[in-house]
Image: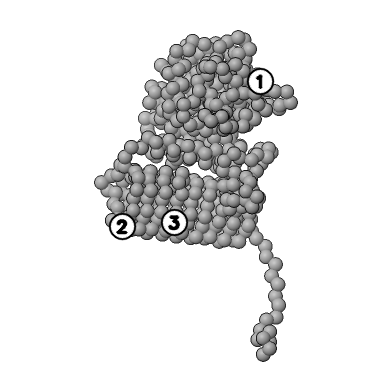
Amino acid sequence: MKRVLVLAGGHGKRMWPYSSTQDKLMLPVAGYPLVLPLLETLQEQGFSEIYLSANGRGWTQLTQYLTASGRLGLRDALRFIEDSKLQGSAAAVAHALQQLPADISQLLVCCGDVALAPENLINFLQRADSFSGPLSMLVQPLDDAEGHVREAAGDWLCAQVAGDRVQAILGHPRGGVSHRLGGCYLLREKALSEVQYTAPYMEAIQVGMMPPQEADLAQTVANLLQQGCEVQAVVTVDYLVDVDKPWHIMEANRRRLHYLSSKLAESATTESCQVDPTAMIRGQVVAGENVQIGPGVMLEGPVWIGSNTTITRGAMVYGPVVIGDNCVVEEYCRISPYSSIGSRCQVGHCAEIDGILMDNVYAVHYMEFHGIIGRSSDLGAATVCGTLRFDDGSSSMKVEGRRETPRYYGNASYLGDFTRTGVNAILMPGVRVGAYGVVGPGVLLSEDVPDRTMVLAEQNHVRRPWGPEKYGW
C-alpha cells in the first residue's frame, strides 16, 4: 500500500496576521484551501491513506471544511498525527514513523504549505519510481528559463544540483547553489532509518549562519550525501510556490489561476444560471447552480462563479477571477484580473478590488483595495489602499524580527480576520492589520497594527471669528 505523510504542523508565525486565527494549510488560494489540491492529487495517484502531521487547530479546520463541502471520501482517507510541539520536519517524520506500520519500506513526504501544480507531483512520482537510491527529492531552479533570478537563495533551504543528482545541501546560503527545495521527498529504507539521527539544528550551512534549533529533512539529505549516498533530484515542470509569508498567498493565487486558465477549454454553466441579455460576456465562464448575471454586467473570462451568486447592475469582472458561493457583486464595482472572492462576500457601489477577499467580506462604496482581506471583515466607505510609493520602490516588512522587501506584492495591504475600517481610512503601501483590528475614520495608516488593536485619528480644532465683518459690513 502506498503511504504518504503531509507535513502541516508548523505554527506559521511568518504568516501573520492570518496565523493568529487560521492554520496555514487552510488559507485560500484560487478559492480553495492551500492544501486541498495536494490532497486531491495524492488521492488521484492512489494514496488511499494520507497521514496528516498537524496541530489540532489545522486538523479541525480542514476536516470541518471537507465535511461541509461534501468531500467525505477525502476526509475519510486522512489519518491524523498530532504535531503541535515538534520542532522541524525531520522530527515530525520520526514521530510519524512510530505510528505507521513497522514494515513500511518507503514513504512519500510532502509539505502541506507548498502550492504546486499537480504535474510536479505526478512527474516526481514517475521519475522517483525508477531510482533505487535512499532518497528522491523535488527541487526548483532559482533562476528562470531566461537566466533571471526568480528566488533569492538566502530565503530558502537550497541544493546544488548536477544533472539529476543532488551534490550538496545548504540552508539559506549567500549563494553558490542552483536550486531550492520543493517540499516533496520519497524516503526509502536507509533514509527512513537516518531520519531519527538528524541533528536538532541545520549543520549544512555557510560560516556565520545562525540556524534555529530544529531537525529538518534537509539535514537528513545532507547526512546521506556525507555518507556517500546518491540522492535523486527531480526538477519541477510547472509552478511551485512555498507559501511562507502573506505575499506568497498572493503569488500562489496568481500562479494557480494562471494554471487553471490554461486548462479551461470551454464554458460550463448549469440550467439554473440566468443571464440578462444586456450582459456582455467574453471568454469562458464556469457557473454553479442558481447564478444570476444581471443587466449591464461585463465579464471577461475565464471566470469561475460559485452557486447562488448574483453579479448585476453594471459590475465589471476581468478574469481570471474566482468568485465563491452566495456572493453579491453589483453596482459598477470592478474586480481586477487574478483576484479571488470568497463565499458570502458583498462587493459593490464602485468598489475596486485587486487581490483576495476571504469569506464573508463586505467591501462597498467608492473604495480601492489591493492585497488580502481576512474573513468576516468590513471595509468602510472610501477606504483606499495605496499601491505606489513616491519613490517607485517596494515596501519592506518586518517578519519575525527580520526586515524583508518582498519580490512581489510588497506594496499590497494585508488585513487579518475580523477587521474593520472606518470611512475614508487610507492604508499606505505594505501595511498589515492584525486580527480583530480596527482602523478608524480618516486614519492615514503607515505602520502595522497588532492583533486586537484600534487605531483612531486625533484632531486639533482651531476656532476663529468669522462673519460679514470680514467683507466690510
Q: How far apart in space, not on screen, are marks 1 and 3 (Cα)?
A: 52 Å
Is 134 placed left or right of 326 in the picture?
right
Location of mark 2 (residue): 278
Classify 414 as above or below 183: below
Where is residue 364? Give x, y as percent.
47, 58
Q: Residue at the spot x=31%, y=46% of the render? A: 289
Which of marks 3 and 2 precedes in the sequence?
2
Q: Residue at x 53, y 26 (%)?
A: 140
Seen as rendered, the residue at the extreme left is 271
Is residue 125 shown above or below 271? above
Give SS at disc 2: loop
Residue type indicated by callout 1? Ala
Q: Residue furthest right?
A: 208
- Where does label 1 land, which residue? 204
What crowding class fits label 1: few (fewer than 14 Cα within 10 Å), some (14-19), or many (20 or more)?
Answer: many
Q: Position of residue 108 (x, y in %)?
A: 48, 20
Q: Label 2 to label 3, Cα distance in Å?
A: 17 Å
Per the image, the residue denoted by label 3 is 333
- Residue 254 at least partly seen: yes
Q: Nearer the viewer, mark 2 or mark 3?
A: 2
* Vertical placement of residue 200 versus 328, above or below: above
**What is the crowding at mark 2: few (fewer than 14 residues within 10 Å), some, or many (at least 20)?**
few
Checking the image for residue 313, the label placed there is none
